Image (cartoon, helix red, strand yellow):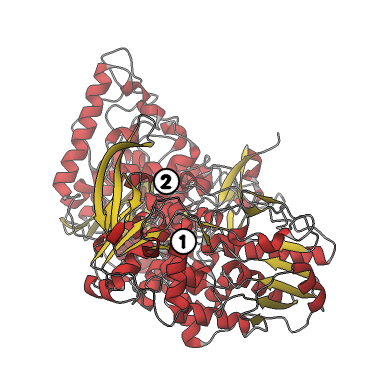
Amino acid sequence: MTKELTAEQKVKFYQKGTFTVGNRLVDADNRSVQASMERSNAITSGHRACQGCGEALGARYALDTAMRVTGGQMIAANATGCLEVFTTPYPETSWQMPWLHSLFGNAPAVASGMQAAMKAKGKKTRIVAQGGDGGTVDIGFGCLSGMFERNDDVLYICYDNEAYMNTGVQRSGATPGGARTATTMPVGEAYPGNVFGTGKNLPRIAMAHNIPYVATASVAYLQDLEAKVEKAMSLEGARYIHVYVPCPLGWGCASNATINLARLVVETGFFPLFEAEHGKVTATRPIRQRVPIEEYLKPQRRFAHLFKTDAGAEAIRKLQAMCDHNIAEYDLLREGEETLA
Amino acid sequence: MTLPTTAPFAITVDVGTSLDNHTGTWRTERPVYLDRLPPCNNACPAGENIQAWLALAEEGNYEAAWQEIMVNNPLPGIMGRACYHPCEDACNRKDIDSAVSIHAVERFLDDESRKQGWLPRVPSDLSGKKILVVGSGPSGLSAAYHLRRLGHAVTIYEAGPVAGGMMRFGIPAYRLPRDVVEENIKRIADMGVEIVLNRKVEDIAAEKAEGGFDAVFLAIGAHLANRAYIPSADAGRILDAVGVLHDMETEESKPMLGRRVVVYGGGNTAVDVARTAKRMGAQEAIIVYRRTRDQMPAHDFEMDEAIEEGVIVNWLTTIKEVGDGGKVMVERMELDADGKPQPTGEMDELEADTVVMALGQNVDTSFVEKLDGVEIKDKTIQVDTQFMTGHPGVFAGGDMVPSERTVTVAVGHGKHAARAIHAWLQSETYQRAEKHEIADFEKLNPWYYANAPETVQEQLDIARRQATFGEVLGGLDETNALYEARRCLSCGNCFECDNCYGVCPDNAVIKLGPGNRFKFDYDFCKGCGICAAECPCGAIEMVPEEI
């Protein structure tokens, strides 16, 4: 990705370990935050996330990195959602950092207020806001847009598991076409799950606000994710990272498939990884091992019906076309570039 | 929990931590770390722990890597060149790009060891037992080395004027330079192994008694050439391959093969003789073989190299007669429905100054026959699982006993026989360690290994290969060797990549620090299985909980 920062760039070697979390052959300084015995474990053990939760993983990856960059001088504002519910069934908390609860829809506004308060008190404490795709793409969208437009000094992280999982897997604005949810059941031949609408691509919407930094990330690409959080924390103003986090329960996949699905969604081209600054894409991550969309869909029961009917087959073709579009749009198959970590 | 009386409404208990919530109770399967057997180690006839020494080499710790080889194999310089590396055929990396060039790293480590003067470990205390080893080929040297490492006094009796056996007489110098052989052998002698040359053993029992030896290991190899009856008007032109290769090593005047050499046979020895003939100045070196290339026992790469050097092969051909003036009558063959060659009656004529027979070798069993209890079957000495013959205290290995006849197999025999002799001397039985489950490719998660093609070893140019005995294949320098070692996937054994530690959504993997690997925190592990799925090398297994 960007050349100047990123631990992943410094590590140029070809032996085992290049894509792994750590590597005993690399200097400790160049290893990922997650490889460190001193990582802060922002969300500690005993939380009640389901087996194999991608969001628990994504949040720890992002927050541990932000904690390292800020030396622990940060506070989080949390939207209501899975992340909050599974970490804080009173009186137990999993949080190893200060955070403030907010409603489902107003985390960005609360974060803006927290940032203003820190500024008023003359403190350098940084603010991170976070929410799921429901709280971000749908319910909190107005507040988020306002936070962007005012260029408040907040990093907002969306953990996207493509539906309202906490309340029972209802469709959100981020649910892909064709997916089965509690509210988009595949009924008969003609209705294969969620409708293919016009799409609501929040990273692109964020870019339209010309904010300093926008990035997409996936829990399967740890070093990439960490580098992006590090980069975001080095900047001021409104910043947005959209992290793709599989949900075994809501998607109907095996609990051990989390990382693999987070990888396949990128390698199919369905979820391109990119960075943008002030409204312009500055870096994209090329596909390393291209796979057809079916490989991503098949392990998930929310897409199982697509493999049974003609309408389903048509839906798969549409999903593949979206991959092809992304591949062309972001030039994801370019050659001659070494992909590391 | 206390109930504070002044607490505001809705907050009636103190804030606690989720560490009170032991999510491990959710689990139906538990992850368990295990060590699986890497396919390379499994395939090595000498039982080297290849993965372990590659891991040391990866860190740049070359001396420790070399010492790790020496635990199992005293001849790394020879292995790195002359072994047919079954380890590389088994290497899982071939399914990603190409196998790790294990032999090239081994060769590099031996070069370093000789450059730096590293020495194998030898115990200072002696057991008081004396063992006689008959024959100084790879299996005899290996047994002597391992017996010495086990604390015994060892003497080798070698019938010939030089030590090395088939490493000299079976493998030409262009594949195995003689200084490498000599230095590898000298290292064993310097450990205190006595090597007596020109000492042919005729009566084993008498030698054993006379020398006061507690046990004997026989390893004289297979040096008798197999014959085929071919009518010949000019017997002087017919030589056998073993004799030719032997004379190349020992005779003052090298064998005169002439300008046109015909070699009969399809094994590695036939190819060796043809390539040797080329280097001796033969304009034509023709191999006559009665089957096809696919059926040839010679290794593919050796055949390729021979053809590059100008050796010609007449496939599907047999020699019928060697006539006057070096006229060799050959008959064309064709394969029948079962793939067997059948004569066609069509004849051809070749001209040869020399015809060399390379039809395999046998063991000279005559001196063993005198010993009670020893069983000889199919011209080989029969041994039990302890490498002991029917005569108590007399063991045998290498080409003498039924097995594949390669230098590495022989080294393995020497090692196991040494351990068996050591056990026998204490009235015990040697038990080989039980093998772990093999880490085959399906056990790996290959995503995590970056593409990194094999380093190509440079070859000597053709002109020099046709005229000199210089080593054909070049070695690696340190950069290349390090690169190559780092291509190892560490199949089946944790290499501390931190993946399990990083991908656990529940922080239920505890990192124990460099060299100490990890452990699971079963209080919190929910058993999702991500760690096992994302372990690159297949060192985690999910095991059902007892419910």
- The spot of residue A216 in percent (x, y) is 28, 51
- The spot of residue A278 in percent (x, y) is 17, 59
Which of these two is toward me, B8 or B304? B304
Q: Residue at x 24, y 51 (%)?
A: B349
A289 to A63, vertically: above or below: above
- The spot of residue B213 in percent (x, y) is 79, 74
The residue pinned by badge 1 equals: A34
Inspect the image, locate mark 1, and give the three-letter code of the amino acid beneath it.
Answer: Gln
Determine whether, in the image, residue A192 is placed left or right of residue B95: left
Residue closest to the far top: A188
> How dense is the environment of label 2, judged by Cα within 10 Å: few (below 14), some, or many (20 and up)?
many
Q: Is residue B278 visible?
A: yes
Which mark, residue B113?
none
> How dense is the environment of label 1, judged by Cα within 10 Å: few (below 14), some, or many (20 and up)?
many
Discs 2/1, front: 2
The residue pinned by badge 2 equals: A259
The CA distance from mark 2 to mark 1 is 15 Å
Which of these two is toward me, A246 or A59? A246
Query: For residue A335, what is the image quadrant?
Result: bottom left
Q: Residue at x 56, y 49 (%)?
A: B540
Asked whether disc 2 touches disc 1, contact meaning CB atoms under 8 Å apart, the reply is no
Helix, strand or loop for disc 2: helix
Inspect the image, locate mark 2, and give the three-letter code of the amino acid beneath it.
Answer: Ile
Query: For residue B205, what is the image quadrant?
Result: bottom right
Q: Chain of mark 2?
A: A
B469 to B316, vertically: above or below: below
Q: Chain of mark 1?
A: A
Q: Residue at x 27, y 29 (%)?
A: A177
- The spot of residue B142 in percent (x, y) is 62, 70
